[in-house]
Image: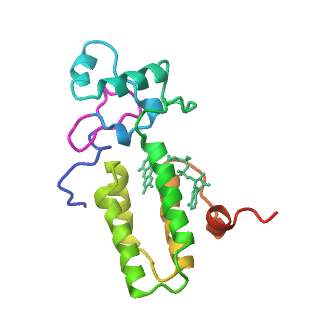
Amino acid sequence: STTTTQPSDTDKTNAKLPPGMVLGPDGKPCKICTAFRNWKPAQGGQSQDRKQGQNSKVAAAMAAAASGGTSQAQPDVRPEYCPPDVEILGRSTWAFLHTTAAYYPDKPNPTQRANMLNLLHALPVLYPCSHCASHLGEEMNVNPPDVSGRTALSRWLCERHNEVNERLGKEKFDCAKTDERWKDGPSD
Ligand code: FAD
């Protein structure tokens, strides 16, 4: 049994919220935890209350662009000035992490190892999507980061990313192809 003091975002998901929208640790709708296509304020009187805590310009733009949206995947129609959603942030963060791993030394010195460990251990604390961060923290407790070298680190990250892929119902990535994807590009 877990001894977490704070319920996760998913535990706090409110049935009245639009499908896919996630509450943050403060109990309010969490923009950075929610895919843009699901960022759609509820209809009727209760949206007035909810609007109080929202950045109205961004919320209005997102609501307008997502109008007619359902929980089904839709094209990303996010206006350029909108802040990142969980998907944009995730894609960018994975690109940073996998690329950093791909260029990590084969034989890192103690300082490089310590810095990489600091970077990775900061994620469950600082990553803005709080439910993503707490899942990652749990995974990292079970599978601590392997910072012994480029290949091991790339594989470790690939496996963590695959855990998220699996949880989201996405295909697993072939971890033998991390260099091709993040460093060398296709051979032809
Ligand atoms: P992404 O999953 O972002 O992947 C980007 C690219 O990476 C892919 O196109 C592919 O070429 C490559 N790739 C895919 N898998 C791997 C792999 N295993 N190894 C190497 N390369 C790979 N979203 C949630 O909804 N809930 C969560 O709990 C959640 N947790 C997250 C935790 C972390 C630490 C991060 C960084 C992101 C998390 N996300 C979460 C976001 C989610 O993982 C995706 O980034 C987001 O859904 C966008 O997905 P995508 O299909 O564009 O591709």
Q: Is residue 51 left or right of residue 109?
A: left
Name above or below for residue 125 compared with residue 80: below
Q: Position of residue 125 (x, y in %)?
A: 28, 60
Q: Is residue 37 left or right of residue 56?
A: right
Residue extending furthest toward the top: 44
Q: Quadrant of residue 38?
A: top left
Q: Is residue 32 left or right of residue 105?
A: left
The residue at the point 35 percent across, 37 percent down is 31
The residue at the point 47 percent across, 24 percent down is 66
Q: Quadrant of the N terminus?
A: bottom left
Q: Position of residue 103 (x, y in %)?
A: 56, 72
Residue extending furthest toward the right: 188
Name above or below for residue 40 compared with residue 160: above
The residue at the point 27 percent across, 28 percent down is 54
Q: Is residue 139 magenta?
A: no
Count of numbered tags = 0
Q: Quadrant of the C terminus?
A: bottom right
Q: How is the image coloured?
A: rainbow
Q: Position of residue 117 (x, y in %)?
A: 37, 74
Q: Main secondary structure of the magenta part?
A: loop
Give the extent of the magenta segment. 13-28
Residue extending furthest toward the front: 81
Q: Is residue 17 left or right of residue 50?
A: right
Residue 144 visible in the current orientation: no
Residue 135 visible in the current orientation: yes
Q: Position of residue 176 (x, y in %)?
A: 65, 70
Name above or below for residue 88 compared with residue 97: above
Q: Is residue 24 magenta?
A: yes
